[in-house]
Image: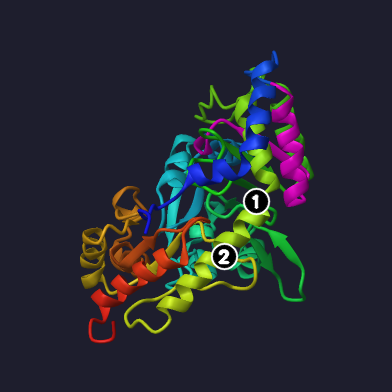
Amino acid sequence: MEDIKMSNRKALYAKLKPELDQAFLAAMGSADLPDGPDVIALAQQLEEFLQVPGALPCAHGAEAMQLALAALDLPAGAEVIVPAFGGHAAAAALAQLGLRPVLADVHPQTFTITPDAVAAAVSEKTVAVVVVHLFGQCAAMAALLQVAANHNLLVVEDVTQALGATYTFTGGSTQYAGAMGAVAYTSFFPAKPNDPADEGGAVFTSKPEIASRLNEWLQNNNSLSLPHAAACTDWRLPNLQAAMVRVKLKYLPELLEARQQVAARYTRLLATVPDCQLPTAAGPGAHVFQHYSIRVPTALRNGLQAHLQEHFIPSMIYYPEPQLRQHASAGKGQDDFPEAERLHQGVLSLALHTELTEEQQAYICHHIATFLAPEHA
């Protein structure tokens, strides 16, 4: 059996090599390396893919996040609600823009921010909420959009782990993650299904007035004017990177379907293992499995990871440090975010990529069962 890897970019490159190589040579042969036609074409491709009126490719996910928030032109000192479980990048970007992040708890099964927690966190200073579609899973957007409408809040979608995921509303209508809020951002960081040769990101919007602003920035990158303390001085995605993303974006639905099949095998193999909470999806396409993250009792998580490592099985603990310890939230303590606090101590992400074999997954799941339920393994 081959060594198990958390991700396998080399295999993905091998599959798309002819097209990627052709795009690389064409971009390198052009005279527009810093700022060329592939950037404009990528913006149009993203708009068509997500069915939105505006998209802005960026050099990094961090710049995409800042530009998405800056595009809303929020008043300095205003409060923006963010999930208490997940990375701290959104809260950090808000602070850079002179805005105040306010934490809200998350759902114990989907790990995404809950409508009730958002409603409870609203104050007279609240102007927006950042909804993170964590690990590839769409949040409860129908209810979140209703809470936002009730309190006159703008919705910002974090699609850094969920590009291509879809959400189905009551009545059957479906929209992509990133096309439901006022503005959204994503990352093309390596190890994501749509990663380019290095890094990158993009901003999206469903609002025509914000789309006009994004298009102005796209066409006039040397005269970018941002509000507050934003300092995206080197935000433009290089043409070479855009060319790589354009190729991979064409195959994103196919790649995501393959990831969902790998995730389904995990779910089948782990279905009867006790003390092992598996990912849940709100419906077909709602989870694209950037990570396959299980939840085990807090007393067992670190031991399970060590056990897997002993058998040469990689795993990752994402977000081991609670947001509360990194960003103040109106005098709140860890008891105010019980689900987030438990998730920080109980979630473990398993290897997942399109080249993971059934034999490798059976081996991984056998050793998870051996640790959690040795009498049943």
Q: Residue at x 69, y 29 (%)?
A: 39
Percent position (x, y) of residue 127? 57, 51
Please state which amino acid type lies under the numbered disc 1: Leu
Determine whether, in the image, residue 251 is placed left or right of residue 60: right
Quadrant placement of the N terminus: bottom left
Q: Nearer the viewer, residue 119 or 268?
A: 268
**Residue at numbered disc 1:** 252
Please state which amino acid type lies under the numbered disc 2. Gln
User: Residue 278 appears at what percent x and percent y?
Assistant: 43, 74
**Left or right: 29 as drawn, with respect to 123:** right
Disc 1 from disc 2: Cα separation: 12 Å
Figure disc tally: 2
Identify residue for label 2: 260
Comparing 184 with 331, the one in front is 184
Q: Which residues are magenta?
A: 36-62
Secondary structure, mark 2, is: helix
